[in-house]
Amino acid sequence: PQAGNDGISSLSWSPNANILISANWDGGVRCWEVQEQNGQVQAQPKTQINHENNSPVLSSCFASDGTTVFTAGADKAVRMWKLGQQPANNAPPQQIGAHTQPVKSVAFIPSTNIIVSGGWDNKLNFWDARSPTPARTMDLPGKCYDLDVRGNVMAVATSGRHLLVYDVTSDPREHIRKESPLKFQSRCISCFPDMTGFAVGSIEGRVGIQYNSKTMNKDKSFAFKCHRQNNTDVYSVNAISFHPVYGTFSTVGADGVISFWDKEHKQKLKGFQPKGKPISCSDFSFQGNLFAYATSYDWSKGSSFYAQGTPNEICIHYTPDDEIKPKKK
């Protein structure tokens, strides 16, 4: 498969192999096998499936054993694709759940093998893949804009600048509900690998680092500016991806810039040359040595800036330790 004919909405690496999945507004879910040798990266296209009526796919994730991919999107469905098993007659992958509005985000909860989906119908639904009715439904204070699960913690960002943290060890329960520390609409949210907090990115070039509890009665939370040019041009933070080994993280933005950060020392580790077009999504591989990102128009400047025929590209950057490891001060 090629990168796709439309915007790339999400990239997901397998939790135990160099297998990369992309989700696309053209309705396609595509799979690559990636090989890395001495810093040289090769991606081999493997297979592709399509959502019903080629409706946009907005999110993808893996089960924790890496055998199954879950996707969700504008057809209001949550779908399951067992890798290596193609649906007959090019049918869409099996539907395991539904919302009444498009589904913006999907994630896998390893402790219970449950799939969680957040929709524009202000609902969080929890699915056991063997049953068509949700195992649990929870109301959100607004539309789900993004969610992320790490271990037994889930963070959700909704419209109205609401942020929610859930304990999903067994029966999911709301742990924290707060207003975003950022003054503008939330775009992305990502849990720390150690589950102590999360990072939220906004449309106004800013990231909030939030801790789920106070350490020694001190709240270490802070926010910082990024994805800006000359302080007058301000761009959306489209994705935040944490490194699985070092807990450092990347931000990618509508300004075409990728940056690596260290929240503990509050410093920038690496800035890439601007890519010339928006970066819509990103993800680190399970070992952390491969960083995948997609360049495609994110509609941040409306339809008048859309240049038809502009290629959408998926790039994989080999990431040696010295680019992403915290630097000693």
Image (tube, rainbow, N blue to C red):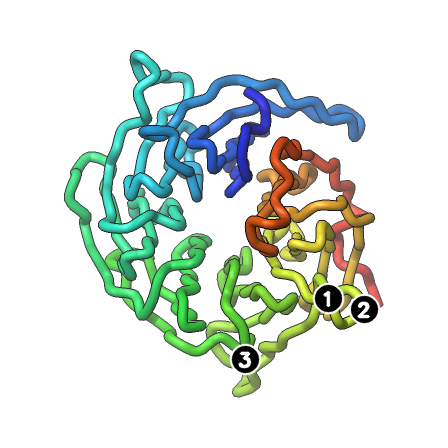
Q: Amino acid at mark 2?
A: Asn
Question: Can you say which quadrant of the picture contains the C terminus?
Answer: bottom right
Query: Is residue 156 visible in the rendered structure shown here?
Result: yes
Q: Is residue 159 rendered to the left or right of residue 137?
A: right
Query: Is residue 16 visible in the rendered structure shown here?
Result: no
Instruction: Give the Cα distance between marks 3 and 2.
Output: 36 Å
Q: Residue furthest front?
A: 304
Decide which of tag 3 and tag 2 comes sooner along the chain.
Answer: 3
The structure residue drawn at horizontal position 74% and vertical position 36%, both measured from the top left corner, is 318
Q: To which residue does mark 1 refer?
A: 233
Relative vertical location of residue 161 with respect to residue 78 in this rendering, above or below: below
Report the front residue among 157 and 195: 157
The image quarter containing residue 317 is: top right
Q: To which residue does mark 3 refer?
A: 215
Image spot of residue 193 (x, y percent): 54, 56
Q: Which class describes the residues within 10 Å of circle 1: few (<14), some (14-19), or many (20+)?
A: few
Q: Amino acid at mark 3?
A: Thr
Residue 230 circle label: 2
Image spot of residue 94 (x, y percent): 27, 28
Relative vertical location of residue 175 with respect to residue 15 in this rendering, above or below: below
Q: Is residue 113 rendered to the left or right of residue 9?
A: left
Relative vertical location of residue 134 with respect to residue 69 in this rendering, above or below: below
Instruction: Determine whether the residue tagged by mark 1 lies in a helix, strand or loop.
Output: strand
**CB contact under 8 Å: marks 1 and 3:** no
Instruction: Determine whether the residue tagged by mark 2 lies in a helix, strand or loop.
Output: loop
Please state which of the two labelled residues, at mark 1 or mark 3, is closer to the viewer.
1
The structure residue drawn at horizontal position 24% and vertical position 48%, both measured from the top left corner, is 99
Q: Amino acid at mark 1?
A: Asp
Q: Which class describes the residues within 10 Å of circle 2: few (<14), some (14-19), or many (20+)?
A: few
